[in-house]
Amino acid sequence: MSSRIKVVQSLAGAEVGGAENYYTRMVCALAEREEFQQYAFTRPNSFRVPRLEQAGVEVNTFRFGGRFDFVDHWQYRQALKKVAPDIVLAYMNRASSLTPNGDYQLICRLGHYYDLKYYRHADYWIGISKGICDHLIKGGMPAEKVFHIPNFAEEKSVESIARDSFDTPTDKPLLLAAGRLHVNKAFDTLLQSLALIDDAILWLAGDGPEEGALKRLCEELNLSDRVRFLGWRNDIASLMKTADIFICPSRHEGLGSIVVESWLHNCSIVATNSQGPGELITHGETGLVTPVDDEKALADAIQQLLVDPDAAKRLADNANKLYYQSYSKKVITDQYSDLFINISAER
């Protein structure tokens, strides 16, 4: 083995998304460590690829096509052989299933409670929450080869945006929610909660298959003048700097990386007790947690912080302190670095 550990980080992924953004952050963070020589294997992407290359990482792009895309699969395997990595870290189903066993240590990283059939051939597994790690172990993966390493947020200084952006009245409470407009995110429950709260304005950042249904629900609830659909945004941190409270109403959420992002940016949070946020947040200490799909409980928790800004600030300050203790870029990158060094020594 050379003095530098060769690491391939492999992600198929969508054009945009939380996992895709985290992949980019993780590759760039590890690129700052002199002990590693990194290669990014991913799909062509006008945002991701230039950022990875700017960080000094060699990028190889593939279609990561379906089961009958034999040429692309062959090219992917040939690229792995050419790099001859010590470690391959594969993200999510597609990249994990397409990465064969080889003369390297294969680590599969799970950000949700995925079907484990895509991951059984790996040598090691990373779960970004304790619940996902339990899912892996209960599914038959050896506990000593399963590691809990959560996500860190994008740590860069940002400015708030103007509170009157998107034609928003400045004298009203301002709520923020963000994520793919998918049934798992339960933005329909959030809208039903908003109908129980006087005056508050909601910025909803994201796009997805539920957009039409959510807009129709706004009309039914007479909320059209109080909800701003912002589309997909790359400035969530700036939105957090402006909003009074961040809301995570999910029905299902592997970790809720958006939770730690709100902690970093001192935005108090109200979340439902879905898998990840329920694990991360200590109710009354680092945020407020309510039952899944309980619009009244969610509305009551939001209202509790709106009428008591000192309590909201205390939660945000507690959460920010916890972020730097346990979820910061340095803390998480150290954990990956230690894991890679330890398992590469076993080859």
Image (cartoon, rainbow, N blue to C red):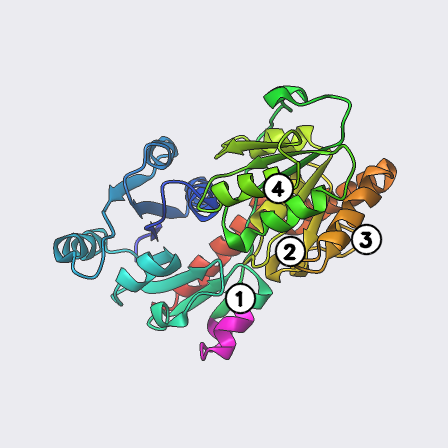
Q: Which residues are magenta?
A: 132-145
Q: Kindly identify which residue carries mark 2.
A: 277
Mark 1 residue type = Ile
Above/below status of 109 relative to 300: below
Image quarter hosting the N terminus:
bottom left
Mark 2 residue type = Pro
Mark 4 residue type = Glu
Q: CA distance from mark 3 to mark 4?
A: 33 Å
Q: CA distance from mark 2 to mark 3?
A: 13 Å
Q: Kindly identify which residue carries mark 4.
A: 220
Above/below status of 46 relative to 342: above
- Of circles 4 and 2, the one toward us is 4
First in sequence, mark 3 or 1: give its number.
Answer: 1
First in sequence, mark 2 or 3: give its number.
Answer: 2
Q: Kindly identify which residue carries mark 1.
A: 132
Q: Kindly identify which residue carries mark 3.
A: 284
Classify mark 4: residues with Cα within 10 Å, few (<14), some (14-19) or many (20+). few
- Of circles 3 and 4, the one toward us is 4
